[in-house]
Amino acid sequence: MTDSRAEPTVFERIVAREIPARIVAESERVIAFHDIAPQAPVHVIVTTKAGDYRDVVELAAGDPELLAELVGVARDVAGDLADGEFRLVFNTGASAGQTVFHVHAHVLAGGLEEGTLAGA
Ligand code: 5GP
């Protein structure tokens, strides 16, 4: 859980429409928008509207149904913006490249290179 006294994350500010973003999908508790610095032809961030969980490990332990909802939105985005196939990346921890500590998945799709796990 994040500290409720902490500053809102950049993604919470997008949810609140304080920061503009190109929103592509939304469900009750999940939102998806184009990454500001795309690393693939389709690069969409899928995140929880609330910033209660820092990463996917916390989310899976704390609210597996919400994790499933997030994955479902990722699937829908890949179907809408690409051919339905996608790479789903959850950077977990600073040394793994996580910079925003509000659980989110990177949906990467639309002509990815084969043979590499890089891309986010
Ligand atoms: P992480 O490095 O934590 O896995 O992913 C954070 C992602 O959020 C990065 O790919 C970064 O480009 C994206 N990002 C950071 N700030 C913003 C923003 O203000 N708007 C959007 N659309 N994406 C952002």
Image (tube, rainbow, N blue to C red):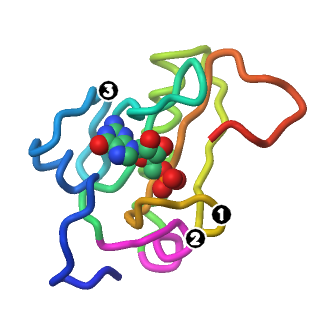
Write down the region rendered in magenta.
52-62
Q: Nearer the viewer, mark 3 or mark 1?
A: 1
Above or below, 72 against 115 in this view is below
Asked which quadrant contains residue 39, the reply is top right
Q: Tell me the distance, in whole angstroms, between the alpha carbons under discs 3 and 2.
A: 26 Å
Query: What's the amino acid at mark 3?
Result: Val
Circle 3: element type: strand
**Mark number for residue 24?**
3
Classify mark 2 as within 8 Å of ligand 1 or not, answering yes or no.
Answer: no
Asked which quadrant contains residue 77, the reply is top left
**Could you tell which of marks 3 and 1 lies nearer the N-terminus?**
3
Q: Are marks 3 and 2 in contact (CB under 8 Å)?
A: no
Q: Residue at x 52, y 21 (%)?
A: 79
Please provide percent x and percent y for residue 76: 46, 29
Query: What's the amino acid at mark 2?
Result: Gly
**Mark number for residue 96?**
1
Give the position of the C terminus as an image quadrant. Answer: top right
Classify mark 1 as within 8 Å of ligand 1 or not, answering yes or no.
Answer: no
Query: What's the amino acid at mark 1?
Result: Ala
Q: Which residue is mark 2?
A: 93
